[in-house]
């Protein structure tokens, strides 16, 4: 019997339908000689420290570091019944096909089951990029030898075990040291979550330190040949800051008076440049999350859930957890089929599709840029828009528009810069004249975004100007402005920062590695990392933005720089890639991580920990002092008389402006209560 091992029930149902395995049984589908079953995500998880010994139930510095000699796993209680079904079916299998998601984590979900069940028969790998019937049939006809994807499992296992070593040891270490210094909360440390948290904490501190500076600008409304346009004043050298802003009101006021008195400006030079913009690449998950956060106001997890629904439930788009915005050149042959499916799905697209050139090859078609996954695109078969929620439809239309844009010409416009002089003052007018709308026809919202982001004078159409042309001064407006602090992160902008974290690393090799691995975290994990920080109350939502809490600042200040440095993640990712390529063994990697963790534990057990503790509020019930504790929904203030008094106060973000902390220093001894 050939058994197909999937990742989730919906995936199993789709594959079973194509295979003709129509008989539904408990936890599986069966057909002639085939059975399709599933794992419901991870049925197995890494064992907690207490599974390695009763002594680890109690947190103690004396017991650190915890380095397993032989790694243990355990079956998840919530899904144990499905585990038993899968185990029984694998035991009956004469041949096994791994059909989990086509990524590192999907490989681990299947392989950990196979290893635990001691299966020794032949294995093949089904590599799916979409769950519509045509894509499943194509993949079933091109099964991979399992040995090709086995290194993915070792890489995933290395990541999982190293994360365990970091999380279990350093979270216990710094939580215990924090207690010695008077901090009652849990200091949770993670390889990716901690540098991510530092991004937000650093931004909030930058906002808190920011001092606004006033400056002045002048807009001049000019006209020529019956057409009005706006020019901006260019302050003279020596009157501006590094950004070219005039900081001296008397200078700006004098310029206004001179320009008003002159009543006329003369063109000094005019330069026009033809600009050609290629269509944007297709969406990878991170970029989709950024755009949906900005344009639709969606949280990153909500975007991922919607993209997953479009993939699994509606069969409308391809695999969402992709880190690539490119397509393999072999998929050019599928373009007519995809366009026909889009037209059948939405007949209203007919006028746009009629303008497309399906043979056009944009920069998105590039075999050298495609790894395990390609950009997120519509599938080969029609879908039902009426079955989608409003949010699902909005995300689908974004994905669809980026695909259609690939078959339209470049967007072309003439950018004109005119320099003028008026009463000894320099002015500049910038104009934009669209020559070919091109791919903007498929992305009208893109044009709206640009119009909203650009100053009026940069999107205006200038009259015909030439050197020596005289223009009438109609209005002069002096604007009092202030420099603005950096904006707090939204979830989408934080994802973008995680992807672009290479800019914060100075080492050239690490910087390049972070660029190659698209920063810290992966497309599949960034949403869960941000959600985890929110759940632990390290991050707090403020409208559409997120801010660091007092607990976050306490953690970032307490842990060593190596933990908050994204360069550390770069080194890890480099090693994981080496494991995947067969250039490093799993055991060698874990040995290095174990040594590093042990050294950190030894170093911090013998030093003085300086920790900032935010002032605790009084108990709302009895007025006693409160201590920070952690619960199911994150950290909170709890009455120090608990359980006699059960008063609590929620922890809120200070928006980067912390209450005056109480700084305590204590000698950290090797012993902890």
Image: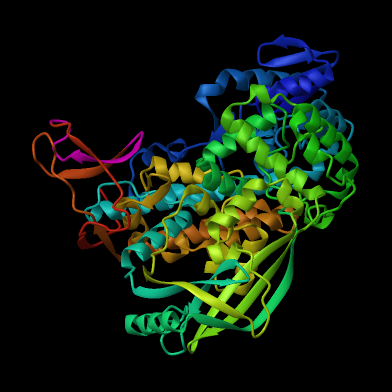
Image-quadrant location for residue 265: bottom right
Above or below, 205 against 231 in this view is above
Q: Residue at x 85, y 30 (%)?
A: 140
Above or below, 25 against 474 in this view is above
Please, which colouring scheme is shown? rainbow
**Closer-to-camera residue (232/444):** 232
Q: Residue at x 41, y 85 (%)?
A: 258
Rendering coords of residue 253 (x, y %): 35, 80
Image-quadrant location for residue 399: top right
Left or right: residue 641 versus residue 598 is left
Left or right: residue 497 versus residue 410 is left
Would residue 639 be counted in the magenta stretch?
yes
Rendering coords of residue 150 (x, y %): 75, 43
**Closer-to-camera residue (332/275):** 275
Left or right: residue 59 versus residue 38 is left
Left or right: residue 307 versus residue 331 is left
Magenta-tinted stretch: 631-644
Quarter holding the N terminus is top right
Image-quadrant location for residue 274: bottom right
Rendering coords of residue 172 (x, y %): 37, 49
Rendering coords of residue 260 (x, y %): 42, 79
Q: Would residue 254 be seen by someone viewing this image from the given angle?
A: yes
**Closer-to-camera residue (539/389):** 389
Q: Residue at x 28, y 54 (%)?
A: 178
Q: Residue at x 67, y 21 (%)?
A: 86
Q: Would residue 72 be seen by someone viewing this image from the given angle?
A: no
């Amino acid at each position: 019997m050939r058994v197909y091992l999937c990742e989730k029930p919906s995936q199993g149902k789709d594959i079973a339908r194509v295979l003709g395995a129509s008989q539904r049984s408990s936890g599986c589908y069966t057909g002639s000689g085939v059975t399709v079953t599933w794992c419901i995500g991870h049925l197995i998880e890494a064992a907690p420290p207490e599974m390695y010994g009763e002594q680890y139930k109690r947190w103690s510095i004396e017991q650190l570091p915890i380095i397993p000699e032989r790694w243990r796993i355990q079956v998840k209680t919530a899904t144990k019944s499905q585990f038993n079904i899968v185990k029984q079916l694998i035991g009956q299998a004469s041949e096994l096909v791994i059909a989990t998601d086509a990524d590192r984590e999907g490989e681990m979900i299947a392989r950990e089951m196979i290893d635990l069940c001691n299966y020794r028969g032949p294995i093949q790998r089904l590599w799916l990029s979409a769950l519509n019937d045509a894509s499943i049939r194509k993949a079933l006809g091109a099964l991979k030898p399992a040995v090709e994807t086995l290194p993915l499992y070792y890489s995933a296992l290395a990541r999982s075990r190293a994360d365990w070593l970091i999380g279990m040891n350093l979270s216990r270490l710094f939580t215990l040291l924090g207690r010695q210094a008077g901090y009652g909360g849990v200091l949770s440390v993670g390889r990716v979550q901690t540098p991510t948290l530092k991004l937000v904490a650093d931004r909030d501190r930058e906002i808190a330190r920011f001092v606004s500076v006033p400056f002045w600008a002048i807009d001049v409304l000019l006209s020529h040949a019956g057409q009005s346009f706006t020019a901006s004043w260019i302050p003279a050298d020596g009157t501006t800051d590094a950004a070219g802003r005039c900081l001296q009101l008397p200078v700006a006021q004098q310029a206004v008076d001179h320009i008003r008195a002159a009543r006329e400006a003369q063109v000094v030079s005019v330069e026009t440049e033809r600009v050609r913009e290629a269509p944007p690449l297709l969406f990878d998950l991170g970029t989709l999350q950024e755009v949906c956060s900005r344009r639709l106001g969606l949280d990153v997890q909500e975007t991922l859930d919607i993209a997953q629904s479009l993939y699994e439930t509606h069969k409308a788009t391809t695999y969402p957890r992709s880190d690539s915005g490119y397509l393999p050149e072999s998929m050019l042959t599928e373009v007519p089929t995809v366009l026909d499916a889009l037209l059948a799905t939405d007949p209203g697209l007919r006028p746009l599709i009629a303008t497309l050139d399906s043979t056009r090859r944009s920069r998105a078609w590039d075999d050298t840029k495609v790894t395990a996954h390609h950009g997120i695109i519509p599938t080969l078969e029609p879908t039902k828009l009426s079955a989608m929620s409003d949010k699902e439809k909005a995300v689908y239309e974004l994905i669809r528009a980026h695909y259609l844009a690939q078959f339209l010409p470049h967007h072309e416009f003439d950018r004109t810069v005119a320099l003028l002089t008026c009463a000894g003052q320099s002015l500049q007018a910038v104009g934009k004249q669209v020559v070919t709308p091109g791919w903007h026809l498929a992305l009208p919202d893109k044009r709206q975004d640009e119009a909203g982001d650009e100053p009026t004078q940069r999107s205006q159409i200038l009259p015909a100007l030439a050197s020596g042309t005289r223009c009438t001064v109609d209005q002069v407006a002096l604007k009092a402005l202030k420099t603005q602090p950096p904006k707090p992160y939204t979830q989408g902008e934080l994802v973008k920062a995680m992807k672009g974290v290479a800019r914060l690393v100075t080492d050239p090799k690490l910087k390049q590695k972070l660029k190659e691995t698209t920063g810290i975290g992966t497309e599949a994990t960034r949403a869960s990392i941000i959600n985890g920080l929110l759940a632990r109350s390290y991050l707090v939502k403020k409208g559409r933005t997120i801010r660091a809490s007092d607990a976050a600042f306490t953690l970032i200040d307490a842990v060593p720089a190596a933990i908050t440095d994204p360069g550390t993640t770069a080194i890890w990712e480099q090693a994981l890639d080496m494991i995947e390529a067969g250039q490093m063994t799993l055991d060698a990697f874990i040995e290095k991580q174990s040594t590093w963790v042990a050294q950190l534990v030894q170093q911090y057990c013998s030093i003085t920990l300086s920790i900032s503790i935010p002032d605790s509020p009084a108990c709302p019930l009895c007025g006693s002092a409160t201590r920070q504790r952690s619960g199911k929904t994150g950290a909170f203030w709890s009455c120090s008389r608990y359980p006699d008094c059960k008063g609590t106060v929620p922890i809120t973000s200070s928006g980067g402006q912390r209450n005056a902390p109480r700084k305590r220093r204590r000698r950290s001894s090797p012993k902890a209560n």
